[in-house]
Image (cartoon, rainbow, N blue to C red):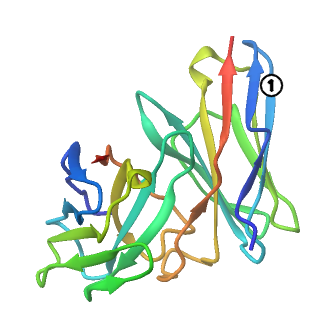
Amino acid sequence: DAKTTQPPSMDCAEGRAANLPCNHSTISGNEYVYWYRQIHSQGPQYIIHGLKNNETNEMASLIITEDRKSSTLILPHATLRDTAVYYCIVRVGGGGGADGLTFGKGTHLIIQP
Amino acid sequence: KAGVTQTPRYLIKTRGQQVTLSCSPISGHRSVSWYQQTPGQGLQFLFEYFSETQRNKGNFPGRFSGRQFSNSRSEMNVSTLELGDSALYLCASSLARDRGDSNQPQHFGDGTRLSIL
């Protein structure tokens, strides 16, 4: 699986959009970009994933650059409950089966009131 | 739809004992994976089961084992507990059948926090 690079921490004001970057310059053509988050004392929560097109769901939007070497997770209107560690993971397939997910250190997003 | 359920939520054991943790996957999910999370090592993959068969295993000693039942429920066992086994143990389930199953992410439970005294 491709290695990812994320900033260790970020701040965002409540109500503003939170934009979390992820670099994955060695991504292969058949590797997907996944985002998970982990709120303190809970298990990781799946947010969104994509291959090359931008994706949006009820939680967030995922913007993948045309060369697929980086991506941005966007939380459109951040709330205090979005304070968590956000993990960007790149791997073949759906993140299920086989080797398991490889979690890096992620980005600790802190939403400020 | 109920999420992944792990029991117990908290457990305290002493060195040398053994422990069994339980995981009930989301209904219909046949792939179950286990992870260990510690402050020093982060989240690390233990093993994955599909249709009662272990398909892959992470880099953990043989003291860590697991199994899956015909209803997809899974258990993991740790024998001869060591202080370093204190961790949050997470279970995740998925609809994925193989690594190339592209639209099936893993869904995690809230874990069992194991403390070794």
Tell me where residue A10 appears, x and y as whole percent.
Answer: 21, 47
**Vertical order, A70 against B115 (above or below):** below
Callout 1: SS:
loop
Q: In the rendered image of this protein, does residue B103 appear above or below residue B106?
A: below
Q: Is residue A42 left or right of residue A34?
A: right
Q: Residue placed farthest to the right in the image?
A: B70
Quadrant for the N terminus of chain A in the image: bottom left
Q: Is residue A100 visible?
A: no
Picture residue at 33% right of the left edge, 61% below the top: A78
The residue wearing badge 1 is: B18
| Residue name at image x 17 percent, y 66 percent | A26
Q: Where is residue A112 shown, x and y percent of the image? A: 28, 46
Query: Which residue is rendered at x = 37% and y = 65% of the image?
Result: A35
Please name whichever residue, B83 or B54, is drawn nearer the observer in this view of the structure.
B83
Q: Position of residue B90 (x, y in %)?
A: 62, 46
Where is B2 relative to B103, above or below? above
Q: Is residue B68 left or right of residue B48?
A: right
Is B77 situated left or right of B105 in this image? Answer: right
Task: Report the chain holding disc 1.
Answer: B
Residue type for callout 1: Gln
Q: Identify the residue shown where x is 75% and y is 13%.
A: B14
Query: Can you see residue B34?
Result: yes
Question: In this image, B35 relative to B9: left or right?
Answer: left
Quadrant for residue B17, please give it: top right
Please provide percent x and percent y for residue B67.
79, 52
